[in-house]
Amino acid sequence: SFAGSFRSSQFAGSRISFTSRNTSAVTFSVENVTTPPKVQKSEDFELLRDGVKKPAAETVLTPRFYTTDFDELESLILDANVDEILAINQEFKNDYNRDHFVRDEEFDQSWDHISGDKRKIFVEFLERSCTAEFSGFLLYKEIARRIKDKNPVLAESFQLMSRDEARHAGFLNKALSDFKLQLDLGFLTQNRSYTFFKPKFIMYATYLSEKMGYWRYITIYRHLAAHP
């Protein structure tokens, strides 16, 4: 892996926070951050600073950040599939899932009854999920920005996917705050290494990860519905 173009992007060295509302858009604010202080401890977790969890160490199993060949993506000829891609973009614009990530009154409670190993495992699950969604947001946003002039149809697809990934990352990071923790996504942007994938593998990995994510989340949902 290597440090890709995101290291010098507008997000490097910034703290990024998401706001998900009952709309089709997700907004995020950016503010500069300084070098984090010496790592602290909270329960079983190391902290960058008060309430901000130190990111999990990078391993083979932790979610990666990616970069790709933007010139190759920009030059893709979509003539044979443009109608299908336009239809997909319209589905994205309809935004059927926009009401799925709104925190209602059920979230107004304490989660202190989840303790010990269960709490640790669940926090790690939220962190991995948030990191993976945020990684997708960064990649898709950068692809959309880089190819919009020469391949606007595909750029719109990635722009809309980045909207959804931002919404997911924001929701999951907010869920971490229920456990008195959160991730500094700007710190992640600046300090993670970036893995290069050719565009064909980006397409395949995106499809596969979304399929796997769906089955993971729907399995969790069905379990919780059966055991409220």
Image (spheres, rainbow, N blue to C red):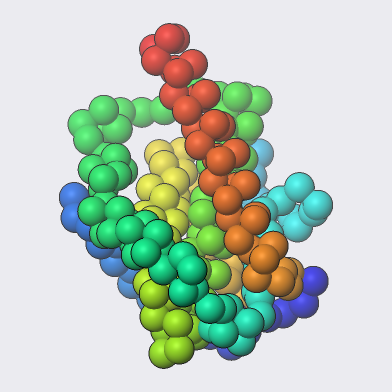
Q: Residue shown at 69%/62% (left/top)?
A: 201
Q: Residue shown at 22%/35% (left/top)?
A: 104
Query: Could you say where residue 24 lies in the image, as x and y percent from the top left?
Result: 23, 57
Quadrant occupied by the C terminus: top left
- Depth check: give the residue in front, 198 or 81: 81
Quadrant occupied by the N terminus: bottom right
Q: Is residue 139 above or below residue 53?
A: below
Q: Residue shown at 64%/63% (left/top)?
A: 202
Asked whether the viewer can see residue 180, the reply is no
Q: Is residue 14 above or below residue 20?
A: below
Query: Could you say where residue 86 lies in the image, as x and y percent from the top left?
Result: 34, 65
- Depth check: give the residue in front, 41 or 218: 218
Query: Could you say where residue 176 lies in the image, as x and y percent from the top left?
Result: 46, 44
Asked whether the viewer can see residue 164, the reply is yes
Query: Could you say where residue 143 lies in the image, as x and y percent from the top left?
Result: 51, 76
Would residue 65 appear left or right of 170 to someone viewing this image?
right
Would residue 223 appear left or right of 53 to someone viewing this image?
left
The residue at the far top in this view is 226
Q: Residue shown at 29%/44% (left/top)?
A: 97
The residue at the far front in this view is 80
